[in-house]
Amino acid sequence: MFTVTSPASPVYNCIAWAAGDATRWWWPDAFGFYYWPDQTSRSETLDAFTAMFRGLGYEICEGSRLEAGFEKVAIYVDGRARPTHAARQLDNGNWTSKLGQEVDIQHDGPNEFPATCSYGVVARFMRRPSLPA
């Protein structure tokens, strides 16, 4: 089950949304067309995405269970282990995702997407202490 929470926008993508940025597109392209944090490998690998989220204060954790005092992200990969998507857990335990250039959604669990979405599987959960409101 999911709910649309904002209109479509080509300005930012799922990685930016999971990182808390709705002002630019994040992707580790080799040419630097998109934003990617400095000092993080510009490779499309789970390790590079993990390092990027580590730079934002996240650490690897187990599972999608809501933990008081923490916010979580999920990193998804395809059959070749290449990152395809990221989602962020909300305070209520639901998840939020940006669907490419389309809408943002709130979904019940990390794998509750519209049938038209195929992001692969969650390869890694990460968490960091919740930021002050």
Image: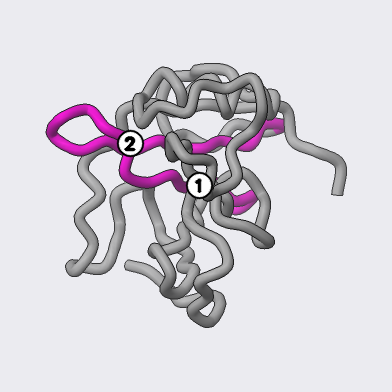
Q: Main secondary structure of the magenta part?
A: strand
Q: Position of residue 60 (x, y in %)?
A: 50, 17
Marks 1 and 2 close (CB-CB < 8 Å): yes
Give the quarter of the image for residue 83. Answer: top left
Q: Amino acid at mark 1?
A: Ile
Asked if residue 20 is positioned above or below residue 67 in the image, the reply reads: below
Look at mark 2 in the image and give the residue it sits on.
Answer: 83
Left/right of residue 82 with respect to residue 102 in the rendered view:
left
Helix, strand or loop at label 2? It is strand
Helix, strand or loop at label 1? It is helix
Asked if residue 91 is positioned above or below residue 102 in the image, the reply reads: above
**Measuring 39% from the left and 64% from the top, which residue is drawn there?**
99
Q: Amino acid at mark 2?
A: Pro
Q: Position of residue 64 (x, y in %)?
A: 43, 34
Look at mark 1 in the image and give the residue it sits on.
Answer: 15
Visible in this render: residue 49? no
Residue 91 is a magenta residue = yes
Give the quarter of the image for residue 116. Answer: bottom left
**Measuring 46% from the left and 74% from the top, which residue is drawn there?**
103
Left/right of residue 21 with respect to residue 29 in the rendered view:
right
Magenta-highlighted residues:
69-93
Decide which of 104, 48 is in the foreground and name it. Answer: 48
- Check the picture and name the quadrant holding the N terminus: bottom left
Residue 85 is a magenta residue = yes
